[in-house]
Amino acid sequence: MGNKILYTFLFLLPFMAGAQPWQSFEITVNGDTINRVDQGKLKQGPWVIRVESLRGEPGFEEEGYFSDDKKEGAWRKYNLQGDLIAVENFRWGNRDGKQQYFTMMGELLREESWKSVNPENPYDTIDVPDLNNPMVTVSKVIKHETSELRHGTWKFYDPTSGMIIKTENYLFGQKDKGLGSSTGSTDDLSAEQAKPTPKPKAVEDWEKKNSGKKKIVVRDGRTGG
């Protein structure tokens, strides 16, 4: 009977090993599985990464999730003393949306805004003025050359008072010069925000390329005659 059980176990062992989804992993004190690497050598699921101090650069620990070796969702970063110093958000392995950075005492230092670019479809559609009729806009497809772009409002804070001391605005990686940066009182901010919004660089390049032409043909996605 004992030999039969042993034979059955040895027969099933290769199949059990083949069914194991993880090439490597770690187990926490609570029994949770983290730092998983699948059979394709890709990081998956919850991870905790520790980086020691080196050549004057402070070390840190960060925790979050991987999906097919790319960071995904919210990641929290701590210094080696355990203080929260950043909350970052990722999509397709790149920064996306709001990022927050803190002092060791927990005061907010700055908020950044980023746009992640889909590596399988690095294109966006923006509205540009029709050169033949400035009252009409048409859609133009642009290709992003980088995997992540500064996009949206960046805010810098006085950690003591919590007041915003500076703002910067970006559009697809280009600094918005009309709303580019501001400091001082709310009156100053309002004055800055009242300025006209400049065109993105892609739009300026397009207009420069087509300036002087009598008729511009733009593909806007419509079909038919």
Image (cartoon, rainbow, N blue to C red):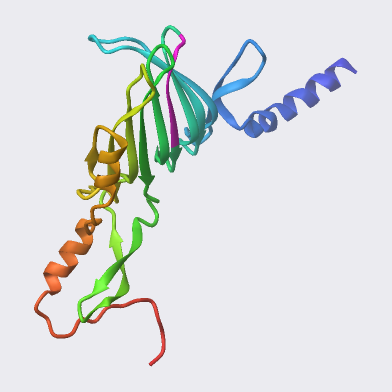
Q: In the rendered view, would you say 99 is above or below 61?
A: below
* Residue at the outermost right position: 1
Q: Quadrant of residue 80?
A: top left
Depicted 102 relative to depicted 38: above or below: above
Q: Residue at x 47, y 24 (%)?
A: 76
Of all residues shown, which one is farthest toward the bottom?
225
User: Number of labelled discs?
Assistant: 0
Q: Position of residue 169 (x, y in %)?
A: 28, 44
- Residue 51 pos. (x, y %): 37, 15
Of residues 196 and 199, the one drawn nearer to the viewer in this rendering: 196
Q: Nearer the viewer, residue 100 or 94?
A: 100
- The picture places residue 11, in percent across and down from the top left corner, at 74, 29
Q: Main secondary structure of the magenta part?
A: strand
Instruction: Farthest residue to the top: give it.
Output: 81
Task: For the C terminus, give its image quadrant.
Answer: bottom left
Nearer the observer, 184 or 121: 184
- Range of magenta residues: 82-89
At 69% from the left and 33% from the top, the residue drawn is: 15
Residue at left 24%, top 38%? Answer: 182
Q: Quadrant of residue 36?
A: top right
**Residue 161 located within the stretch drawn in magenta:** no
Does residue 84 belong to the magenta stretch? yes
